[in-house]
Image: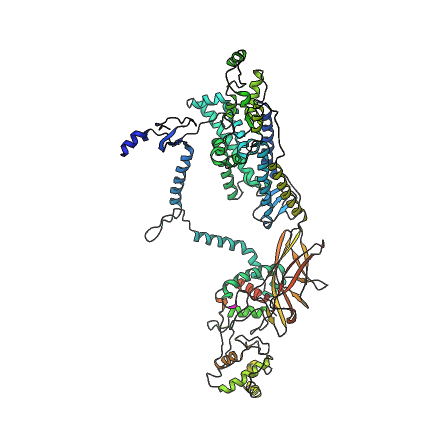
Amino acid sequence: MATLGPNQLDSITGQTTTAHEWDGICELNTPLPRWWLWTFYASILFAVVYWVLYPAWPLATTFSHGVLGFSSRGQVAEDLQAIHAQRAQTEAGLEKASVTEIVADKKLLGLALAHGKAAFAEDCAPCHGSGGQGGKGYRNLTNEDWLWGGALDDIQTTITHGIRADYDKDTRSSAMPAFGRDGILKPEEIHQVASYVRTLSKLAPEPGVDVDAGKKIFADNCAVCHGDDGKGNLAMGSANLTDGLQLYGGDFKDLIQTIMFARNSTMPAWGTRLDPVTIKALAVFVHSLGTGQ
Amino acid sequence: MSRAQIERAHGVHGEGPLYVAAAKVYPQKVHGTFRRLKWGLLLLCLGIYYFLPFVRWDRGPNEPPQAVLADLAHSRFYFFFVELWPQEVYYFTGLLILASLGLFLSNALFGRVWCGYFCPQTVWTDLFMTVERWIEGDRRDRIKLDAAPWDANKIAKRAAKHGMWLLIAWWTGGAWVLYFADAPTLVGDLATFHASFVAYVWIGILTATTYYLAGHMREQVCLYMCPWPRIQAALTDVDALNVAYRSDRGEPRMSLKDASKTRAAGQPAGDCIDCYQCVAVCPTGVDIRQGSQLGCIQCGLCIDACDAVMAKVRRPTRLISYDTEENMKRRQRGEAPVYRLARSRTILYVVVMTIVGSLMVYKLTTRQHMGLSVLHVRAPMYTTSGQDAVRNGYALRFSNKWSDTRQFAIDISGVKDALAKSEQADALPDGRLKVSVDPDATQEIEFYVTAPRSSATEAGVPIIMRATDLKSGETVSASDHFFGP
């Protein structure tokens, strides 16, 4: 095929060619409609307008902020504000009611549980686990091994004032002596009392250790806080030693360590960090984990 | 070769343009069967679109009384007696499957009937062209007006036309938002400027797109933006009825005078008198005599135009008609035309559509008014409480699709000596727990089951939760496992 000159017509299609020819094949010129070009220009214009209005260009130490002052961070803040405004009405109900009243009212209960669940995941789950299952040294909130009381009011007080949070004068406070470290009991006596404590939870005592001697040591040193029967005392947060659910583990070794050094772990006083509605919601939620009293 | 030599040899400077202005189409007025059909369908389609939101449908006191409503705020879709929840979005998938198969079927039978009669682009363009013709006159007048200087007459006509177009476009956008809120209330709010900002934004968007697409872009949408003409071209076959020029009858085309002379001389002369009426009336500006093509939306207006001419020159009508490629070949061979509506592909489409449609109707008519889903609390999987009891936690979510508040009683089975407890449920006299669920809503409760350790295994014992509606007796159940140490 002969090379077609500029604007010559291709004999088969009747179209003009671009006059570009490769090995006898000519490229047909099919011009795009002009509005297509305009949409391209419009897109460029859009981009320029966007640069002016919105954050766009990275600069040496900052970036172009755009005249609208938009930022996605700001939008989040706005959205949060809108959510709070939307919730204000329902929150008002929670604010007025006491925890007991909240639990009695199905609507308020639903709200408090939803609120409490979210707050729990944020503030409590790091120690107590996502489902309140706890861990060694962190109270499992799903069983009945309450140290400071499992009633709604008790839970609310514990969350508000914390445990051994020395910056809160109403905090839950008690201290178990470090019987070993402070030389109150000899190592052998500690072994004996640990072995006895295991029998309180119907667990096997350590073989070869004198349990009866341990019982006497218990009566002399421990019963004052944990009670003669070892059932503990909610008023001072002393553990119930008969339920087989020990905060720091019920193994012989764990018990020895606890008696030797004492544990006395702490929990923050959330009253200084959270608003009262959230604390109420948390109390209701923790109570609902199943074994609240 | 140097660059200069190449340019001399190939004429780079003489290249054709990369962009050209789209040729403006001035469709002429036409009367006839297909024009009447198009008027009817146009009125029907627009009537449905503009007025459907005002149709009422009583669903009881707690639900909206609008027949067709996409309630985005409450994530509900209403269509007369059907109410869909977000989790039932698969009905839309089914509808889309039916719609695409319907499109394929219509294409296999009658070509681009969708494009020619039902496509919103066609319907609104037709409406806008009617307004244009009404204000500026028919084809010749419009061509003249375009060429005329900008005098008072032209300015007045143009202002009137664009004003009318914008008004229709605005009404189109206005009708759109009525599908997303209670129509009469929203009309009042819009009129008093109390409607939400989003409503005005959407009216603005729809006004702009309608005005530009139906007023200015027209056939360019079909030629450059729409994927369907390309897909359609790949799907069509020789037995599909398409708007076609019967070249077997029309060629060789020549003027009326030449034709009579040629016929007198005993030579064959085609029926086409090359009057260009078919091109003049075409809304996309194609010449149907060049055969099936991308630009042809098969609206049939050229059939009306050609029929009028054929009647005038006393030749048989339907030189342009709905015809199949196969029949044109058959007639050239002197065989009788055949119409094969039932072909393997049309049968296949109908079968698949029937299956999908039946499945959807079956699902829709047998779906329950209530639902229950259960999620095991995983942290922890179980709690040992005291010396002999083990407890599992579950989140139960009840759905109430009735329009009144319902009480659901909960039974559990599968775990020996199991006891259920929930702060969010009340006890019935028979000992079962009862949950109250708001109309057309869901309710989630924390639910604890306690059982002796001997009832549980580490691998889990199957547990079945069953909810019974105390009013209708309808039940629904869900299963999970009960774990222990």
Judging depth in this view, the residue of B13 and B443 nearest the camera is: B13
Where B265 sits versus A164, above or below? above
Judging depth in this view, the residue of B230 and A118 nearest the camera is: B230
Q: Answer whether residue A80 is visible to the viewer in this image.
A: yes
Residue A129 on the magenta segment: yes
Identify the residue shown where x is 65% and y is 63%.
B463
Judging depth in this view, the residue of B245 and B313 nearest the camera is: B245
Tell me where residue B99 appears, x and y as whole percent.
Answer: 58, 40
Tell me where residue B267 appears, x and y as whole percent.
Answer: 53, 14
Dominant SS of magenta comes to: loop
Looking at the rendering, which quadrant does residue B115 occupy?
top right
- Seen as rendered, the residue at the extreme front is B333
Tell me where residue A199 appears, x and y as whole percent.
Answer: 59, 82
Q: Considering the image in quadrants, where does the N terminus of chain B appear?
A: top left
Residue numbers of the magenta segment? A127-135
Where B98 sits versus A239, above or below? above
What's the colour scheme? rainbow
So how many labels did they put on this image? 0
Q: Considering the image in quadrants, where does the C terminus of chain B appear?
A: bottom right
Judging depth in this view, the residue of A201 and A19 nearest the camera is: A19
Where B24 sits versus A192, above or below? above
Tell me where residue B415 appears, x and y as whole percent.
Answer: 67, 66
Where A131 sits versus A257, above or below? above
Residue A60 on the magenta segment: no
Q: Answer whether residue B324 is visible to the viewer in this image.
A: no
